């Protein structure tokens, strides 16, 4: 339970609907949650040793190799957090609306413990939206830094895109859990029926084949 001490100390569970959680089983689940807190960001979480190792990705993941996205390592989260979608009350830690933007399974390249300790973690994602290889590279700490800053970088593979392609964050903005927008989640609305174009259906089929 020590792994979740920081997570639990920052939250008042009689106020927020976030799960208290407990140390879970080993596995390789991943989730990315779109989080409209003080600043919009995307939380990357990788299951390891019964918890979700977590990074706040400032501008969200990019499918363009070489497009380095700042990823600030935050406290470990419980596995139960993977299903959390809703609004954290204003004034609480991380106050704002949370969406389950993507989820699936991840596979590390080599020993993930060694990669985290070394500051070079390479892995593959098999999600509803994100696929292929990725790197997490820890940056050198500067005076005054309180947290570990990393860079999230897409590997060059079939799932990568170029700067001419559409941004995956704009192309597929909805929740993979409920199909809702951030606004609908915040207003506790049900999913709005949306028409899927033939072009969108072709893109989804191509992504599943990768």
Image (cartoon, helix red, strand yellow):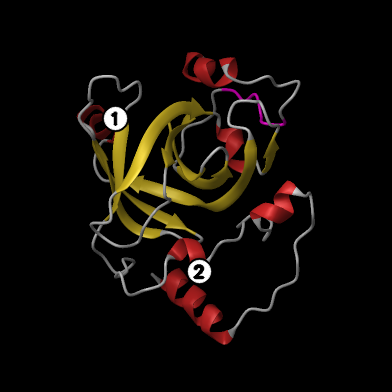
State which region is magenta. Answer: 17-22
**SS at badge 2:** helix
Residue closer to the observer: 193 or 35? 35
* Residue 50 can be seen, yes or no: no
Judged left or right of residue 148, residue 204 is: right
Where's residue 204, x and y in %?
50, 73
Please, is residue 140 above or below residue 131 in the view?
Answer: above
Residue 10 sits in quarter: top right
Please, is residue 150 above or below residue 153 in the view?
Answer: above
Judged left or right of residue 197, residue 132 is: left
Q: Which mark is residue 113?
A: 1
Main secondary structure along the magenta-highlighted residues: loop
Residue closer to the observer: 92 or 73? 92
| Residue at x-position 75% and y-position 61% | 191
| Residue at x-position 23% and y-position 26% | 141
Judged left or right of residue 96, residue 139 is: left
Please, is residue 93 above or below residue 33 in the view?
Answer: above
Neighbourhood count class around disc 1 (C-alpha, 10 Å): few under 14, some 14–19, many 20 upward: few
Residue 58 sits in quarter: top left
Quadrant into which the C terminus falls: bottom left
What's the CA distance linking mark 2 and mark 1? 34 Å
Q: Which mark is residue 92?
A: none
Tell which tag, 2 or 1, sits nearer the viewer: 2
Where's residue 82, x and y in %?
58, 40
Disc with the residue nearer the chain's start (2 vs 1): 1
| Residue at x-position 55% and y-position 53% | 101
Q: Which mark is residue 171?
A: 2
């Amino acid at each position: 339970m020590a792994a979740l001490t920081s997570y639990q100390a920052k939250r008042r569970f009689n106020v927020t609907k976030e799960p208290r959680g407990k140390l879970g089983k080993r596995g390789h689940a991943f989730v990315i949650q779109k989080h409209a807190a003080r600043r919009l960001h995307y939380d990357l979480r990788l299951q390891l040793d019964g918890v979700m190792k977590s990074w706040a990705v400032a501008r969200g993941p990019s499918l363009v190799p070489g497009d380095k996205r700042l990823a600030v390592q935050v406290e470990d989260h419980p596995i139960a957090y993977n299903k959390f979608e809703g609004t954290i009350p204003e004034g609480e830690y991380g106050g704002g609306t949370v969406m389950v933007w993507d989820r699936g399974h991840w596979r590390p390249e080599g020993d993930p413990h060694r990669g985290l300790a070394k500051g070079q973690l390479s892995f593959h994602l098999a999600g509803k939206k994100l696929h292929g290889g990725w790197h997490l590279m820890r940056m050198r700490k500067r005076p005054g830094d309180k947290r570990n800053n990393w860079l999230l970088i897409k590997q060059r593979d079939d799932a990568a895109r170029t700067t001419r392609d559409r941004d995956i964050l704009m192309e597929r903005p909805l929740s993979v859990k409920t199909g809702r927008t951030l606004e609908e989640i915040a207003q506790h609305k049900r999913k709005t029926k949306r028409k899927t174009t033939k072009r969108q259906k072709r893109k989804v089929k191509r992504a599943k084949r990768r």
